[in-house]
Image (cartoon, helix red, strand yellow):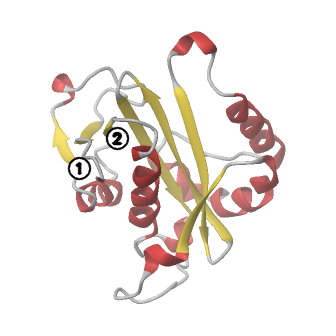
Amino acid sequence: MCRKQVMGPDSRLKTLVKLEPLDLSHANGLFKALNHEEIGIYIGGADVTSLSALEDRIKFLKQGPKADSNQLWVNFVVLLNSEIVGRVEATLHDSIAEIAYLINPLLWGQGLGTAAAELLIDELRGKGEYDFWATVTPENKASARVLEKLEFVEIDPGQAPQLLSYDSGDRTFRKKFHSLS
């Protein structure tokens, strides 16, 4: 895999990264960003399989969860200089915000996942008081580093609440809510 260098480590990456609410108009760019075998390594398979399937999923996500689920879905595309480079999402339920992030693997290792997840957390703080949670497979050391940079703390899965994203064997991380005011 050939990586594309975005900028040096001292750059102001967070100012170049933006989130935009996921919309059907993002399908083509999102497909290009995430149509890589490497994306599926830690999530149990490909995130995107075809442009048509991605369009169907975006339509489904835009409908939101069932009314009786007590959930709120939050979905954004990640933009770097106006180019779609990935997506971030959260499922809000029971005072919990479960977050996830996927970035174009050609750009891994440059801080985009950290910047995008931080922007997502900032966005979620405006939606209420949630403790932030994330799960990663034990092999996904890079994703665990993203969470650690964002001051998430690893928690024994047995001590965690019921997390919708948890699969047996996953590492579980928590970041307590802190008001910005």
Image height check: is 162 above or below 81? above
In the displayed structure image, the side of residue 156 where residue 40 appears, left or right: right
Vertical arrangement, residue 149 with respect to residue 81, above or below: above
Q: Which one is earlier in the sequence, the residue at label 1 or at label 2?
A: 2
Pick out the residue farthest to the front.
Answer: 181
- Residue at 28% x, 53% y is 181
Q: Is residue 42 above or below residue 172?
A: below
Q: Which mark is residue 134?
A: 2
Q: Residues within 10 Å of mark 2 (few under 14, many from 20)?
A: many
Name the residue located 34 percent from the left edge and 35 percent from the top edge: 130
Q: Which mark is residue 152?
A: 1
Residues at marks 1 and 2, CA–CA distance in whole angstroms: 9 Å
The residue located at (45%, 78%) in the rendering is 13
Q: Amino acid at mark 2?
A: Ala
**Can you tell which quarter of the image residue 100 is in?**
top left
Element under label 2?
Answer: strand
In this orientation, which residue lies closer to the viewer: 11 or 128? 128
Q: In the image, residue 151 lies at what x, y percent? A: 22, 55
Comparing 44 with 60, the one in front is 60
Q: Which mark is residue 8?
A: none
Q: Quadrant of residue 55?
A: top right
Residue 52 rendering spot, x and y as whole percentages = 84, 43
- Nearest the camera: 139 or 163? 163
* Circle 1 SS class: loop
Mark 1 in CB contact with mark 2 (< 8 angstroms): yes
